[in-house]
Amino acid sequence: MLTFKTSIITLVVGMILGYLGQRSRFCTISGVRDFYLMRDSYRLKGFLGIIIGGIIGFGAVNIFNGKLQDFLHPGSFEIMPILADGFNVEPLILVPVSLLGAFVMAYFSVMAEGCPFRQHVIAGEGRLSGILYLLGLVSGVLFFDIVLVPILQVISLL
Amino acid sequence: MVATLKGIWDSIRSWIKSFKFRLSDNMALITGIAMGVLAAVVQGYFNVQPPVGAGICAVSHPANLVNWVVNQIFGTSFTIHSIFVTLPVLTSVGFILGSFIAAVINKEFKFRKGPVRDNLLAYILGFMVIVFGLMWGSCPIRTAILASYGMVFAYVVLGAIVLGVIAACEYIKWKVRR
């Protein structure tokens, strides 16, 4: 049981959040979109709630003997390249790459009517486009690994 | 005496009822706070680190899961977060299962066409979102968690996400007007 600790705890946390997300229609991208288009702050409160809950949670865990690496001083450039983790990528090239990636991700998420978390939830509800979106997610990961990671490495060597 | 007690009880009951009403109004806020607290608990007490702030993510966790499965089957060496190398991360499976359970319990589960009408477009959108999301490496949820962890650059990225949403909204407005 202990050896499967990481898998089990992530599964349990995912199920709790999936349940809550289905009941509350939580979505980060739609939160900003609803507020911008219709001045509806219901879901935007959820997005801001993550930051509030994170500050409360990390503060409490830090006080009550939790192990947090580099709390309040995360090496910003070391943790950015998520899948280029083991490679020697020049840190400064990742600033524009990250900002471009976040911008375009938000743009296409509005077109898909929900952030990636929301797409998982609507796939669980039985919506067809959510399931197809998840299939696209899987093939996109493989495309990123096979095509884009080598390109990023070549760019960073220049 | 009994009348005053009854009055107090009635006022308490109406207060609880009003609180319940407000609870359903703030369900998204509660979900968000639960996300932040659970990310902290998972990282602090179940030692899901490095990388920091990776308790919950809807972009890097599915990517890690896919890479883990492909590595196991085909013997490739696609990169995975070091904490998830030996065991798979099942957060995304949990999201789907949890929302499926919630939908079945509340009798909302039904196969139907999704919010995106065009099937091929839904597939392409998922593809584009994960390709560009992996350049930054986090979904908006994990970006907010990193921001609360004390990472300054995450606030800049949150600004970029808001700008992307505004650009898409302006495009939709322009398209509707035309």
Image (cartoon, grey):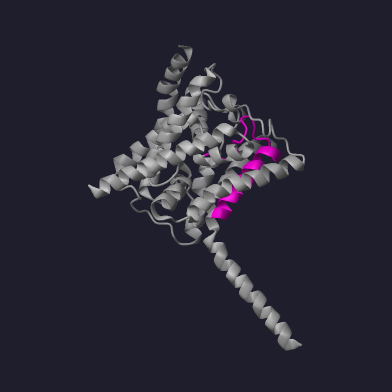
Left or right of A73? Residue A30 is left
Magenta segment, which residues?
A: B29-57
Q: Residue furthest top?
A: A158
Residue B35 in the magenta stretch? The answer is yes
Task: Give residue B30's position: percent from left, percent from top.
Answer: 58, 54
The image quarter containing residue B163 is: top left
The quarter of the rendered structure image containing the N terminus of chain A is top right
Residue B145 in the image: above or below residue B74 = below
Residue in view at x 52 percent, y 62 percent: B25
Q: Nearer the viewer, residue A124 or B36?
A: B36
**Residue A68 screen position, x and y as percent:** 70, 35
Identify the residue shown where x is 49% and y is 28%: B67
Would residue B173 be visible to someone looking at this image? yes
Question: Residue at horizontal 36%, vertical 38%?
Answer: B125
x and y percentages locating residue B146 in the rendered image: 59, 37
Viewer-side residue, B50 vs B68: B50
Total marks in image: 0
- Farthest-out residue, left: B178
| A25 in magenta | no
User: Could you say which is closer to the camera, residue B85 or residue A18?
Assistant: A18
As drawn, B90 above or below B12? above
Left or right: residue A65 versus residue A79 is right
Work out whether residue A133 can be spotted. Answer: no
Q: Residue at x 51, y 42 (%)?
A: B93
Residue A58: x and y in percent read 68, 42
In the rendered image, which quarter contains the C terminus of chain A?
top left
